[in-house]
Image (cartoon, rainbow, N blue to C red):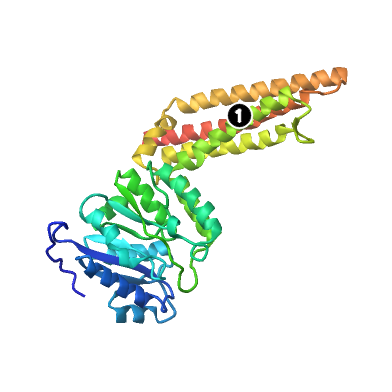
Amino acid sequence: MSTHPIEFDLVRLEHTAVTVVLPCLNEATSVGACVEEALAAIEAAGYHGEVVVVDNNSTDDSAAAAVAAGATVVREPVQGYGAALRAGFAAARGDIIVMADCDGTYPLSRLSELVDPVALHQADLVIGARLDGATSASMPFLHRYLGTPTLTALVRLAGAQTGLTDSQSGFRAFRRGDLDRLALNSTGMELASEMLIRAGQCDLLIEEVALGYGQRAGESKLRTWSDGMRHLRLIMRMGPHVALWYPGLALLTVSVLLLLASVFFPDGLAIGEVLWQPVFAASILAVVGVCAATAGGLLGAFGPDASPRVRQKFAWVRDHRTPRRLNRGALGAITLGIAVDTALFVRWAEHQESLGAQLQIATVAQVAVVVGTIVLMVGVLLGLFNRRAVAR
């Protein structure tokens, strides 16, 4: 298939070719129709280009069907959506790349609505948003109303973007020349999130076009929980301030409020006919919160996937004074907690009186000891990391 660009009219930019990349795993029943639809859409829009189908270890006749329909087929032995797409991007010869699926879910006939803004330099990356046009037949309820909105919110914050509504749509157009800046390395479904976070970190202009989402032909390759966890792990690495640091601080704040409530209301908080003792939940939240915030700070400062912007946000972690400050605060919390617990025990041993609010105060003291110990260990390790960084 020829990919030499043609001359465009005044509306379109000259010398623009389009490559549509379709990852494929056992899609023999639909890949041919998708290739034909994409080629027809490229021609109808006045562009010139190609369709690259990436055979990701299919065991059916997907590759033969794609070739028969007019596609170029490349093979990617590394299993995974991200690996297949990256192989397709590497093989693409067009100035603009469109990524989609070959299961019939994306309206490839409307390809120009993604490509035109990129060709006219009105956007750097255009996404075909699905949610407004999705149905119960095309997208499961939890994916539509919980999974996708949650991941989109995290991706939007991690990439410092506004207006993004569907981070998981795989129908996108972007310039091939931006691939080096994006430096994509995911092999699974999480590539969808990685691309948008890196695009935001590179200050690329992202736009959305509502294009809908059809019912797929064949079996879905999406594994809800394992793929969801891959997305979350990626967001933790690339946006630790969003996934760990801020949530950790929020949990610590809630913990402090609950500990105070438990001290002032030792009999518990009335919830209907039930008296709730928040001190136990507060203890758990304190430990989880300090661990999450600590992980977020360390990943933000030293993580290999953190952007320069995120590293700058956590520059204070790399300051040589930070370990000393953490150690002092931690030792103070440990000392105070032990002192309070000792005083309460001595008082109880001498008077054998009802504990009352003393049990809650003792729990607060124990939380101070536990949290202080965690922070102390972090301070010691951080001191070692910082010294090694200076030595290098």
Please state which of residues 350 and 95 is positioned toward the viewer in this rendering: 95
Disc 1 residue type? Gly
Asked if residue 48 lies left or right of residue 339, the reply is left
Which residue shows up at 34% across the image and 45% down it? Answer: 200
* Location of residue 222 in the rendering, given as x and y in whole percent from the top left corner: 49, 64
Please state which of residues 185 and 111 is positioned toward the viewer in this rendering: 111
Q: Is residue 289 above or below residue 62?
A: above
- Name which quarter of the figure residue 41 lies in: bottom left
Q: Is residue 302 above or below residue 13?
A: above
Quadrant for the N terminus, please: bottom left
The residue carrying mark 1 is 372
Q: Is residue 348 visible?
A: yes
Please state which of residues 209 and 200 is positioned toward the viewer in this rendering: 209
Q: Is residue 294 visible?
A: no
* Location of residue 50 in the rendering, given as x and y in whole percent from the top left corner: 25, 70
* Location of residue 80 in the rendering, given as x and y in whole percent from the top left corner: 43, 65
Element type at marker 1? helix
Q: Is residue 227 above or below residue 162?
A: below
